[in-house]
Image (cartoon, rainbow, N blue to C red):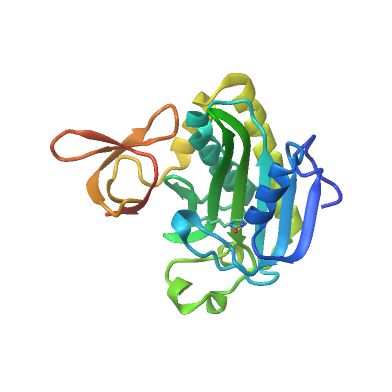
C-alpha cells in the first residue's frame, strides 16, 4: 500500500498479520483518539465479526479484512448513509479491478449471481447525539476458491477470483476501495446524500421486489421493497398498504 491514491484515507495504516478482529482493534484505536482516515488491515482474523452478532470467516491471506475509522461531522441518524456509501465504493472498486458489476442487497451485502463476495459492518462511537467515530469494517473474499469455503458457506459465498478466474493483488483492491470511498465521501460531505442515494439505487438488487425482512427482534415481515428514504432506511410496504421503516434486518428476495 505504498502508493496510495488518496489524500487522507489509509495514510495512517496499521497492518497486522493476525488480529482477533480489525473491527475490535479499530474501536480501541478510535477510543484512543486515532485520526480520521486511520485504516486497520489484517491478513487473518481469529474472531472476525459479522452483522447481527454473526461470525465472519477470515482465513489467512485469501481476503481483505479491514476497518476504516472516519470522523464525519454528522448527526447520529445519518450514519446508515455511510453504510450505503461504502457499498457503492466497493462495487465501483470491484468494477475497476474485474470489469464485473456486482449488485447490492440492502443494506450492504455485495453479491454476484446471488453469492456474497463482500460484507460490510458499520459501527458507531457516539457521545449523546454526537458522532465521535464511525468504524467501517469491510470483509472481501478475494482469492478463495469455492472449495476453500466451509460447507455452510459454499452455497452462499464467492470471491473476486470466481468473477475473473484469476488471482488478484489485495493491496491494489484496497487502494481502489479507498480511492472510490474518498471521492464519494467528499461528495457526500459537500453535497449531501442525494447523489450517493441515486448511485446506491442503481446497484440495488432488492428494490421493487417482494422480500422477506427478518428483523433483529426475530420478526419476519413480507412485503414490497419500495425504496430507501433520505437516511438510508428501507421502506417495506406490506399487503395492507402500511409502509414499514426497516432500520436493521436481513432480507431475502422472494
Ligand atoms: C456482514 O455480516 O456481512 C459484515 C461482515 C464484516 C466483516 C469485516 S472483516 C473486517 C472487519 N473486522 C471484523 O471483525 N468484521 C469486519
> Position of 51 compared to 172: left or right?
left
Q: Residue at x 55, y 36 (%)?
A: 82
Image quarter of residue 127: top right
Image quarter of residue 160: bottom right
Q: Is residue 97 visible?
A: no
Quadrant housing the C terminus: bottom left
> Position of 160 compared to 54: left or right?
right
Q: Is residue 254 visible?
A: yes
Q: Residue furthest front?
A: 128
Ligand 1, seen in the image, is in the quarter at: bottom right
Q: Is residue 78 above or below residue 17?
A: above
Q: Residue furthest top?
A: 191
Q: Position of residue 112 (x, y in %)?
A: 48, 57
Q: Is residue 106 above or below residue 21?
A: above
Q: Position of residue 102 (x, y in %)?
A: 51, 51
Q: Position of residue 32 (x, y in %)?
A: 74, 43
> Position of 155 compared to 219: left or right?
right
Viewer-side residue, 28 vs 249: 28
Viewer-side residue, 55 vs 204: 55
**Number of marks in the image?**
0
Q: Position of residue 140 (x, y in %)?
A: 60, 59
Q: Residue furthest right?
A: 2
Viewer-side residue, 217 vs 207: 217
Amino acid at each position: 500500500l505504498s502508493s496510495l491514491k488518496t489524500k487522507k484515507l489509509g495514510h495512517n495504516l496499521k497492518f497486522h498479520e493476525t488480529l482477533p478482529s480489525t473491527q475490535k482493534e479499530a474501536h480501541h484505536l478510535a477510543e484512543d483518539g486515532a485520526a480520521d482516515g486511520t485504516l486497520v488491515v489484517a491478513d487473518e482474523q481469529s474472531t472476525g465479526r459479522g452483522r447481527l452478532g454473526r461470525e465472519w470467516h477470515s482465513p489467512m491471506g485469501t481476503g481483505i479484512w479491514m476497518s476504516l475509522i472516519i470522523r464525519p461531522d454528522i448527526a447520529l441518524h445519518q450514519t446508515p448513509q455511510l453504510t450505503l456509501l461504502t457499498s457503492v465504493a466497493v462495487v465501483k472498486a470491484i468494477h475497476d479491478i474485474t470489469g464485473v458489476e456486482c449488485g447490492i442487497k440492502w443494506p450492504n451485502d455485495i453479491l454476484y449471481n446471488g453469492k456474497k463476495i463482500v460484507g460490510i459492518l458499520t459501527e458507531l462511537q457516539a457521545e449523546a447525539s454526537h458522532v465521535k467515530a464511525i468504524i467501517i469494517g469491510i470483509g472481501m473474499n478475494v482469492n478463495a476458491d469455492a472449495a476453500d469455503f466451509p460447507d455452510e458457506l459454499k452455497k452462499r459465498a464467492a470471491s473476486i477470483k470466481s468473477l475473473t478466474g484469476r488471482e488478484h493483488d489485495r493491496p491494489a483492491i484496497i487502494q481502489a476501495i479507498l480511492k472510490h470511498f474518498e471521492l464519494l465521501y467528499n461528495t457526500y460531505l459537500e453535497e449531501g446524500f442525494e447523489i450517493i442515494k441515486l448511485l446506491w439505487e442503481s446497484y440495488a438488487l432488492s428494490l421493487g421486489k417482494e422480500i422477506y425482512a427478518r428483523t433483529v427482534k426475530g420478526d419476519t415481515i413480507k412485503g414490497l421493497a419500495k425504496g430507501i428514504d433520505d437516511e438510508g432506511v428501507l421502506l417495506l410496504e406490506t399487503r395492507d398498504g402500511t409502509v414499514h421503516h426497516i432500520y436493521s434486518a436481513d432480507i431475502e428476495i422472494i
